[in-house]
Image (cartoon, rainbow, N blue to C red):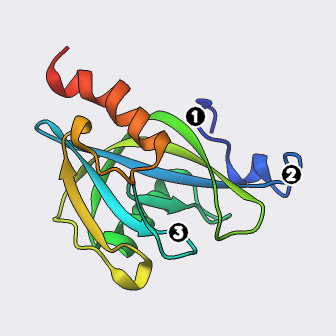
Amino acid sequence: MANGFAPSQEAMGKTRIGRFQPRSGAKALVTSDRAVLVVQERHADGTPFWTLPGGGVHTHECPTEGLRRELAEELDCRARIDEPVSTFWYAHDSLDATVSVYGVYDCSLLTEPVPNYDEGVFDARWVEPDELPPATLPQVRYLCQDAVAPALAGD
């Protein structure tokens, strides 16, 4: 992406960073009142964790197309996708030597989210940033508490 938030699939190609294979992804930062939407997924060993909705972007998709598809697949919902607001990296334990680089986009849901177990989403919750579940990914916790919480509080 030209804005510098997340590299495009073309830019990442088959490039390796050390022994890691980067993968492009997109996540939705959805807020309502004083809460943010988080979803529960599971690590390869079955332990649950909480993250923002979204996932990998296919090579033929731009990040917003991939995010739109991921929201439809994982939460059976539609969303308005606005500007990118942040980025973070995630090293997968389920994908050998893969690190996802997620662009995070400000989003508004147009329909209610319904978790799709078949897509690996087991729950979806609106949570205030200072009340995130203990198993929230550290990158997501930081983004929600340090970037989102002040905006939701009107600071």
Q: Say if 48 sits above or below 79 in the image.
A: below
Q: Position of residue 107 (x, y in %)?
A: 31, 46
Horizontal arrangement in the rendering, residue 115 relative to residue 1 (left or right): left
Q: Which residue appears at 15% of the width and 18% of the height?
A: 154
Separation (CA) of disc 3 from disc 1: 26 Å
Asked if one can make out residue 68 in the rendered structure from this viewpoint, the answer is yes
Task: Look at mark 2 in the image and give the residue it sits on.
Answer: 15
Q: Position of residue 36 (x, y in %)?
A: 24, 44
- For label 1, the crowd category at 10 Å Cα-Cα, with few meaning under 14, some 14 to 19 and many 20 or more, is some
**Is label 1 in a helix, a strand or a loop?**
loop
Task: Look at mark 3 in the image and give the residue it sits on.
Answer: 43
Amino acid, disc 3: His
Q: Position of residue 32 (x, y in %)?
A: 15, 43
Separation (CA) of disc 2 from disc 1: 18 Å
Horizontal arrangement in the rendering, residue 103 relative to residue 131 (left or right): right
Q: Locate residue 97: give its quadrant.
A: bottom right
Task: Look at mark 1 in the image and give the residue it sits on.
Answer: 5
**Is label 3 in a helix, a strand or a loop?**
loop
Which quadrant: the N terminus?
top right
Q: Which residue appears at 27% of the width and 63% of the height?
A: 78
Q: Nearer the viewer, residue 109 or 55?
A: 55
Mark closer to the observer (3, 1): 3
- For label 2, the crowd category at 10 Å Cα-Cα, with few meaning under 14, some 14 to 19 and many 20 or more, is few
Q: Which comes before the other along the chain, label 2 or label 1?
A: 1
Q: Nearer the viewer, residue 97 or 33?
A: 97
Q: Say if 83 sits above or below 108 in the image.
A: above
Amino acid, disc 1: Phe
Q: Which residue appears at 46% of the width and 49% of the height?
A: 137
Horizontal arrangement in the rendering, residue 22 relative to residue 40 (left or right): right
Q: Which residue appears at 67% of the width and 47% of the height?
A: 8
